[in-house]
Image: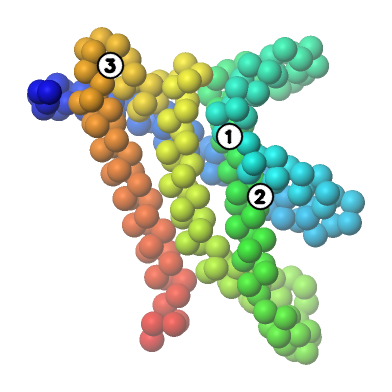
Amino acid sequence: MSFDIPLMALSFPRLLEGLRMTLSLLAVSLVFGLLIALATSFARNTRWLSWPAEAYVYFFRGTPLLVQLFMIYFGLPQSEFIRTSPLWPLLREPFWCMCLALSLNNGAYVAEIIRGGLLGVGKGLKEACWALGLSRFHRLRFVTAPIVLRLCLPAYGNEIVSLLKSTALASTVTLLDVTGIARTIVAETFSPYEIFIAAALIYLVLTFLVQTIVAHFEIRLNRHAQR
């Protein structure tokens, strides 16, 4: 089997055209996913909202993202309520359907990461805060939040990488991200091997950048332990 390196090199400029779509999906989904995760973490600590929050996390962690995407992209337009709601101008667009699926999926996983971080705050620290007379806000600001952030950051970094790779599913709903453009080029050239390797290299570079940024923040947050 011959390997066409010139074709691979020529495909890079076109593949990079999909980088904007990939990064847009990643950025929007990270923001909304984090907001959903924080709201879910709050709901899990309330009496009446804990069960719906647990059900949400269980469903979105227990079903494939592709199934969730198809339920949103193909299922929601079937509802008359959705088509007559103010959300219809957004939900009829593949971009926002993809963002919704990624955000809901990411929110469920990040909510579980936050739960693990909160469990890592020892009971002794809470008792010390009470003994010092710290208010609930100051306890959260100066004790709980810094510890939870340090505990959650490595797992959250892995979740960002996972979300980045999940954006490749956008091509299944007609969006031309990196993978979508790769599929278009393959249909033109009938050379899937070279094209998808080129696309994989782009994702590898993006993953390396995300891991480097997260590692930098980890070092800064743990700098007191390195002295």
The residue under the point 64% across, 41% down is 62
What is the x, y in percent for residue 47? 89, 56
Within 10 Å of disc 1 (Cα), the crowding (few <14, some 14-19, many 20+) is few
Q: Earlier in the sequence, mark 3 or mark 2?
A: 2
What is the x, y in percent for residue 36? 67, 45
SS for dot 2: helix
Residue 141, visible in the rendered structure: no
Quarter of the image for residue 215 reads bottom left
Q: Earlier in the sequence, mark 3 or mark 1?
A: 1
What is the x, y in percent for residue 34? 60, 48
Q: Earlier in the sequence, mark 1 or mark 2?
A: 2
For discs 3 and 2, the disc positioned in front in the rendered view = 3
Residue 10 as seen in the image, left or right of residue 208: left
Residue 163 as seen in the image, left or right of residue 96: left
Location of the C terminus (image quadrant): bottom left
Amino acid under disc 3: Val
Q: Name the residue tied to disc 3.
A: 186
SS for dot 1: loop
What is the x, y in percent for residue 173? 51, 19
The residue under the point 47% across, 28% down is 169
Decide: marks 1, 2 in contact (CB < 8 A)?
Answer: no
Q: Closest to the observer: 24 or 163?
A: 163
Count of marks, rendered view:
3
Q: Name the residue tied to disc 2.
A: 37
Q: CA distance from mark 3 to mark 1?
A: 26 Å
Q: Closest to the observer: 184 or 176?
A: 184
Q: CA distance from mark 1 to mark 2?
A: 18 Å
Amino acid under disc 1: Pro
The residue under the point 47% across, 71% down is 221
Amino acid under disc 2: Ala
Q: Is residue 77 above or below residue 144?
A: above
Q: Is residue 108 above or below residue 182?
A: below
